[in-house]
Image (cartoon, helix red, strand yellow):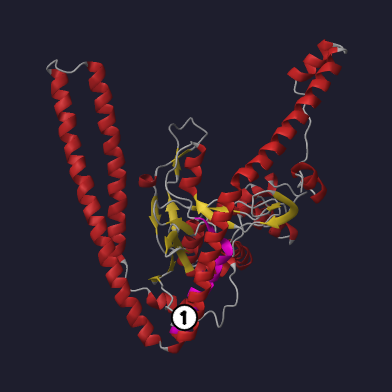
Amino acid sequence: MDEEAAEVVKKIFRLTVEGMGPYQIAKRLTEEKIGKPSYYQATRQRGNFKTMCDFETPYNWTGGSVVRILERPEYMGDTVNFRSHKESYKDKKAVKNNSDEILVFQDTHEPIVDRRTWYMVQELRKTVRRVDTGGKGSLLTGKLYCADCGGKMHYRRSTTRAARDWRGIPNGGTERTSAGFNCSTYNSSRKQYKQVCFSHSIKEDTVKQLILETIRYALKSVRMDEAAFIKNMRSASEVRDKSEVKKLKADFSKKEKRFADLDLLIKKVYEDNAMGKLPDRRYEMLSSDYEKEQQELEISMQEIREKLAQFEDDTDRTEEFLSLVRKYTDIQELTPAIVNEFVDKVMVHKIEEIDGERVQEIEIFLNYIGKVELPVQELSEEEMAAEEKKRKRRAYSRAYLKEYRKKHRPEIRRVIEGAREADKQKQMAEAEASADGLLHTDGTEQVAAMVAGENKIIVESSLPTKEEVKAKYGR
């Protein structure tokens, strides 16, 4: 094994687990002046690299080079054959083979990274991580899912906006919105002017705090009584697995029955067409629809088979979680590496209103052990009385503000609509004055500029000041 190259490969996998993307890793390696793969091979007189390498840029890594390293199973000890083929011996371009034509031989040589790390990296790379204009993304991206539709939760970054008073009118100040997550299905449906699913909105800081408390609770449980923890996790895992297997088998039976029904329908329309009862055009349309549905069912049934096989092959994984716990003495804050190693997924339920209070259920699933529930904190009589007092105060405040807004709503609307109308009149007056000015100039040049889009003016939006708010709303 080439130890020097192996260290670079290990570093690339480690940085990926810590939350960095291929292009961020390429930038880091370039800054640290680590030789790119072609330069490394050329300096050792290997292959065609000694003549094809660009020696003027020995450290210029690219994201594509990092991606190719991350995708190679050879680094976990496997050998892969028949990746591609050529249609003819005359062809120079190779064609990629399908997965069923590729042969993989496991554990044929010493691995550079362990199998679990390699698979973890492939899972991490499934999710597209977007960063905001400040270069910061969320370390929870790809971990949160909607509990109702199963879609991923989209990240909503923190922004600065104009502050408003209780009436909804700007007060001249600014406020910072909290970063959070929303259901991706709900977001997409809003663009099509129809509601599918619900927002499931939740603050990022809230989820982080719950995940941190869950991980720390699991660590504490292991250290206090490891035997009891193993027993509880194994019994809970057995119940979950049986329930999940039962659901999968029921779903498989339903799809299998539909698949058989489609076979009969395809046979029937063929016979009707052959006997002249069904026109050719109608037959082709129905046959195509049935075959398409069968293909989709076949893919879905194969996925269910793989899941059932995984349940059968999986053994108790509590020991793997214990080995992970022993790596950490105490966790004070979340990092990308901790989140990726501990957290499997987080299911976010929609907000419900119970006794006038907004309640939202969050399910946290850790790797190897599944769902972990935090113990319910028992309150003393004094604490319960204090919480009840706070609840009544919040309910009274909500009811009071609701009635107050209802009473003053006509006045609020009049103020807002008056300000909008004034803005509209001002804009119209400015447009009319500008149009009058254009009438006395060379119209040909002005029209040409408009057609070319050269008359566009980019206006930088800004938050209103207190003086502007006072002038606009009369406050």
78 relative to 38 in the view: left or right: left
Q: Position of residue 401 (x, y in %)?
A: 57, 58
**Is residue 113 in sight in this rendering?**
no
How packed mark 1 is, by other alpha carbons closer than 10 Å (few <14, some 14-19, many 20 or more), is few
Q: Position of residue 374 (x, y in %)?
A: 44, 76
Q: Quadrant of the rendered structure where residue 449 is? A: top right
**Is residue 258 in sight in this rendering?**
yes
Q: Position of residue 24 (x, y in %)?
A: 66, 56
Is the stretch drawn in magenta largely helix, strand or loop? helix
Q: Position of residue 4 (x, y in %)?
A: 64, 66
66 relative to 324 in the view: left or right: right
215 relative to 332 in the view: left or right: left
Q: Which residue is mark 1?
A: 384
Numbered marks: total: 1
Q: In this view, which residue lies farthest toward the front?
A: 407
Front-lying residue, 436 or 367: 436
Front-lying residue, 432 or 127: 432
Front-lying residue, 138 or 3: 138
Q: Identify which residue is drawn at 66% across, 37% down.
A: 417
Q: In this view, which residue lies farthest toward the bottom?
A: 224
Q: Identify which residue is drawn at 21% across, 41% down.
A: 259
Q: Identify which residue is drawn at 79% across, 21% down.
A: 432
Q: Identify which residue is drawn at 54% across, 80% down.
A: 328
Element carrying mark 1 = helix
- Quadrant containing the N terminus in the rendered view: bottom right
Question: Please, what is the three-letter code of the amino acid marked with disc 1?
Answer: Met
| 126 falls in the magenta region | no
Q: Quadrant of the rendered structure where residue 285 is? A: top left
| 207 falls in the magenta region | yes
Which residues lie in the magenta part? 201-221
